[in-house]
Amino acid sequence: MIRLDTQLRDFDAKEVMAQAQRFESLGFDGVWTFEAAHDPFLPLVLAASATERLEIGTNITVAFARSPFAVAQTAWDLQKASNGRFHLGLGTQVRAHVERRFSMPFERPAARITDYIRCVRAIWDTFQTDARPNYQGEFYQFRLINPFFNPGPLSNPHIPIYLAGVNERMCRAAGEVADGFHVHPVHSVGYLRDVVKPAIAAGAASAGRSVSDVALYAPVFAVTGETEAQRTESEEEVRRQISFYGSTPNYRAVLEYHDCGHIAKELSALVRQGEFEAMARLVPDSLMDAIAISAAPANLGKALRQRYDGVLDRVSLYFPIQAGDADTSWQRFVRDFKA
């Protein structure tokens, strides 16, 4: 059964608990945070304490900005606080940000993140079983601890690790070591079918696993609105988002899959010039149709379910629910999705 998630709108401590309770009452299955201007873990402590059923997770936290032990410890605490509802979503970010913003190494990111995840799991094993630390990887190690630094076992020790990516090499890494894969919002069902899933399957096979062992989650762009003006505004915003992502080399594989690789360099040049409106105009309708769903609000839940049922294990809309949105509309959205 495909699960329906959403995202925290903001990280104001006074609002997080109310948001999480609202999402749980509306019938969403999970809520995700992201790492941009704020830490992605801190709001989840509040969300966990305010809810009983809602799953919580990071989509994503930047792995290379933190040591494996720091992430393992924080995840362990969140798993305990949520009584087993936490999902750890990790991503590598891009070289410029890792090296120049976080002051951390980035060489061979796919191999590095694979080693990172294995190290995190080794730390968790010691937390749970008190096993002697003995992990020595290519990039990371865990060979020292004493009881003062060990939080001890949990009743729900399995924490699913999701890995984010776009290109084949990162998909293979997810198949090899992850429990889930965070699909980038710039994707299509065709790209998932022909690129992402085969690469995950190849990575899984190399580790004696199956592609079915890796759950897929994706936030999805939606063009919607009650009036023509609202739909136009929504479409323009989605075009801007796609053009912005398309200007970054990391996401060009999706454009090339849809025979739109020729606009990538133009987008990169325009973003350097700050010509954001011109960037959006470069996104063709065919690419919009492949990446975004388009439906009236009354049909949005059904449209989302129809596109991704049997393709993804978890899905959400890309844009967070706003404070002023009517609960009745979102109740209908959730009901129609799950019907």
Image (cartoon, rainbow, N blue to C red):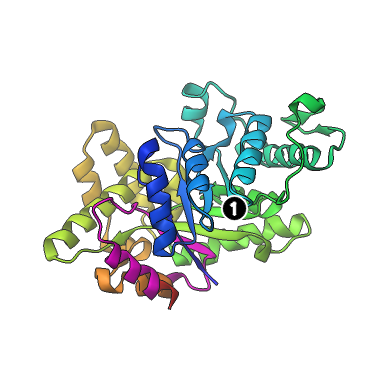
Queried whether the magenta region covers residue 328, the answer comes back as: yes
Vertical placement of residue 85 versus 107, above or below: below
Q: Is residue 211 left or right of residue 238?
A: right
> What residue is shown at x 63% (from left), y 45% (from top)?
79
Q: Residue furthest right?
A: 132
Q: Is residue 6 left or right of residue 74?
A: left
Q: Is residue 82 left or right of residue 142?
A: left
Q: Residue furthest bottom?
A: 339
Q: At which x and y percent is residue 222?
A: 31, 61
Queried whether the magenta region covers residue 98, the answer comes back as: no
Q: At which x and y percent is residue 116?
A: 68, 37
Q: At which x and y percent is residue 309?
A: 48, 73
**Crowd tier of the residue under label 1, counting other residues whose Cα lies within 10 Å: few below 14, some 14–19, many 20 or above:** many
Residue ID for mark 1: 85
Say if residue 51 shows up in the picture: yes
Say if residue 110 shows up in the picture: no
Number of labels in the image equals 1
Depth check: give the residue in front, 113 or 58: 58
> Three-letter amino acid code at disc 1?
Arg
> What residue is shown at x 39% (from left), y 63% (from top)?
26
> What residue is shown at x 36% (from left), y 38% (from top)?
14
Vertical placement of residue 191 versus 85, above or below: below
Depth check: give the residue in front, 290 or 58: 58
In which quarter of the view is residue 330 placed?
bottom left
Q: At which x and y percent is residue 27?
A: 43, 65
Magenta range: 307-336
Asked which secondary structure carries label 1, the reply is: loop
Q: Is residue 143 left or right of residue 163?
A: right
